Amino acid sequence: MPDLRFGTTAPTAAEMAAVEAVVAEVGPATVTVSERLVLGGRSRAVARRNLLLPALHALQRAVGWISPGGLDHVCRVFEVPPAEAYGVATFYHLFSHSEPVADSTVHVCDDIACRCVGAMDLIDELRGAGQHVRPSPCLGQCERGPAVLVQRTGAEELSVAPASLQDVETAIGLSGSSSSSVTLSQAGSGNLRLLTRVGVVDPGSLDDYRSHGGYAALEAAIDMGPDGVIRELTASGLSGRGGAAFPTGVKWQAVADQVGRPKHVVCNADESEPGTFKDRTIMEGDPFAVVEALTIAGLTVGAEQGWVYVRGEYPVAAARLAGAIDAARGAGLLGEDVAGSGRPFHIELRKGAGAYICGEETALFNSIEGFRGEPRNKPPFPTTHGLFGEPTAINNVETLVNVLPIVLDGGGAYAALGTERSPGTRLFCVSGRVMQPGTYEHEFGITLGGVIEAAGGMVAGSQLRTVLLGGAAGSFVGPDLLDLPLTLEATREAGLSLGSGVVMVFGHDDDIVDTVRRIAEFFRDESCGQCVPCRVGTVRQEEVLVRLGRGGSFPDERDLLDDLGSVMRDASICGLGQTASGAVRSAIDLGLLGGVS
Amino acid sequence: MGDPRSLVELTIDGNVVKVPEGSTILDACRREDIDTPTLCWASNLTPVNVCRVCVVEVEGSRVLVPSCSRPVEPGMVVSTDSERVRTSRKMVYELLASSVEMDRADASVHAWMDHYGVRPDRMGDRDEIATVAQPPKVQDDLYVRDYERCILCYKCVEACGDDAQHTYAIATAGRGFAAHISTESDVALPDSACVYCGNCIGVCPTGALVFRTEFDMRAEGTWDEDSQEVTTTVCAFCGVGCNLELHVQDNVIVKVTSPVDHPTASGHLCIKGRFGWQHAQS
């Protein structure tokens, strides 16, 4: 690194202590290599730059903001150019850049699910009571909104859902952390494969996990060896549950085939798609399953280092995962000799800080590495050029957890479930106007109507108008598609996507025009800003919807909306821009924007 | 001398072409005299492929690909003028021109905007839509950062960082439409790590970064590019031998650039070459 010039503002003692604590925590995962290939072969990352994000978190928690003095101190410690660190710090919603006006910031979800259940009123009430409120994109608590995340100076973040004014005021005064319990309508049902332990085991107890079949899969995987695991995975037909449905066996094989360089496995737990909360259900209810599955992934592809990147808005999930990692390490299930296999494997937990885009795999890599969470151009793909430019297998939580029953019961048994082209089971995040919103596990092939039925059907007095399928990046569908089998092939044929498994149900009383506008606002707010089609296109799309909401003429705007959709879909760097017009488009096609179609 | 690299055969706009392995699609297009617009690409910088104006259609690819950074592959079938390509390129220009002042962009930018029939006004009334309008940052005697002309092409960040100067005084800050080029905590340039090499000015395609002389003369209405004479000379400050292009108006040096194809400087200079010409006037 060249000589860097730092600022002259001195850090406070609290800021220095916070950064010191991060340095002291450096585990075996200190990464020393790095060639940054994304922006074309740059080689500028220095050792420990990946601690930049944890250090920023530490500053934010210690003093309530990223002060110029604190930022400068971090830059000196980690040898990061101050302008770059400022660029990283200002990328995330959860970092503040002005002196705190209150000890707590109350982030209230005003996204599509929560705004249908009183989020806007809650914001008014909280403000009326003198709280410092920031409206937030989806907090991933859609089954129990309105949701709130309380960020407190000098204390743990708290998740409150459903939240009332009184709940929030009580939470702010709490000395500990939130004690969210996962409620699962299907808990204990015999047909579950991914959610068997959720709501059944004590998520803080390794012993309890083991007594419910935990770590049997790791043992089996060690016996089978990497080739055996990949054989079963391939036979199972498991495909990625993050939205792209890439065959997991193929991905793992590709990384396993890479030799001569350090490799990584990454668990993408940055679940931020509006309407999505299934991964949170698993992480909060069965965190050891995530650790065990990631360990199997590491041993299978030959990676010694695993990473879990969990969204910053999930304090309970992060705490439980951290506890599970520590317990597994203590029991010899992580470390230099994993479960007597003679093979090393370590896991680092990293927390996001409020950026939907960091769920995009290459943006996630950049975020871990201490750079702005801007997606990289692909190819090259993560299997050859992933985290730190090294071969990486990255899977989301749901995909990984599927590996456990596949290893235990065999790929054949797994493939017997679901349909031929969509084997296995799938998690659905059911929310909106249904009797029992929540995470549900169903075999592929259940119909859309079946999913709604299993969640108790529509709430009394509500009549189904439309379902948002797949999330904000998905599509609105009408009641005519209730018989649609939810499989990869059937949805694809219908021009739809299961996305992250979102089934958000809207009734005739819900304001769909406002919902569609909020989706457009979401993409505008969450665009990283790197490429022109998405940076400006998402803004223009939202402006059109605002104009339409004010009574603008749809025919006048139609060509523009079409062209905005085209350029975002065709020319954006990543999936965010490419899908940012999908839900809007589908709403228009269904005539949901009122008299404008 | 022949090129030692092996050749890759691909099809561009229906013609079979052979280009050296490792070439980008843009390289291949240029070899074939297929004019391709670029904004964030420059021969002396690493491609960041963020502007998306050079996109082309590649058979088998779900979305368009940036020609500036995608290496050619054997058997690739590329279309540079399909309906999808034209729509996306036109839209990129319209999106930019509706949010940024493009009046001082390079002449080639305007030629392409004319070519694609760009109509930024259809995005809405300029007063009612989001733009990056803001006052210029005039913080010293050497140059001005006029960010309402910034298209966020990242070129200045690259020139300040790994691709030339290794000073890292500026970076992208903020996110989405609010993303912008900034020093740390937005401190004034003289308080930042800036060493005033001016290489950011050298690569800026839209006039967002300009010499103070140019900025002041434009304000006075005396800036007249047509009357300027450009003289190439060798910088006398050290032994590296960078070439200087002195832009002279009314017998006064008003700007200094550096030829991109120079073997040592590659278009970049230091503060002395870029700004140390006052002695020539005395």
Image: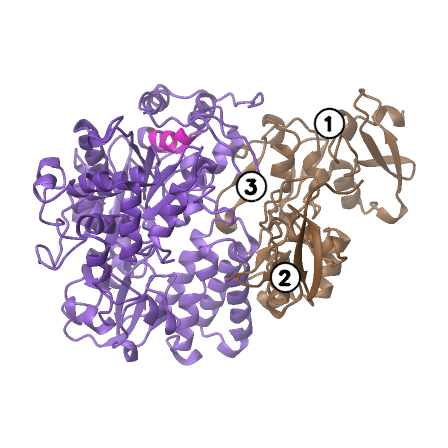
Label 2: few (<14), some (14–19) or many (≥20) C-alpha neighbours in 10 Å:
many
What residue is shown at x 66% (from left), y 26% (from top)?
Answer: B195
Q: According to the image, label 2 marks what residue?
A: B78
Q: Could one spot residue A313 in this view of the protein?
A: no
Relative to A77, is A436 above or below? below
**Earlier along the polypeptide chain: callout 2 or callout 1?**
2
Dot label at residue A255: none
Q: According to the image, label 1 marks what residue?
A: B270
Q: What span is colored magenta in the figure?
A: A50-58
Q: Which amino acid, mark 1?
A: Cys
What residue is shown at x 38% (from left), y 66% (from top)?
Answer: A516
Q: Chain of mark 1?
A: B
Q: Quadrant of residue B196?
A: top right
Circle 1 — which element? Answer: loop
Circle 3 — which element? Answer: loop
Label 3: few (<14), some (14–19) or many (≥20) C-alpha neighbours in 10 Å:
some
Horizontal side of A253 relative to A193 (left or right) equals right
What residue is shown at x 84% (from left), y 22% (from top)?
Answer: B236
Q: Main secondary structure of the magenta part?
A: helix
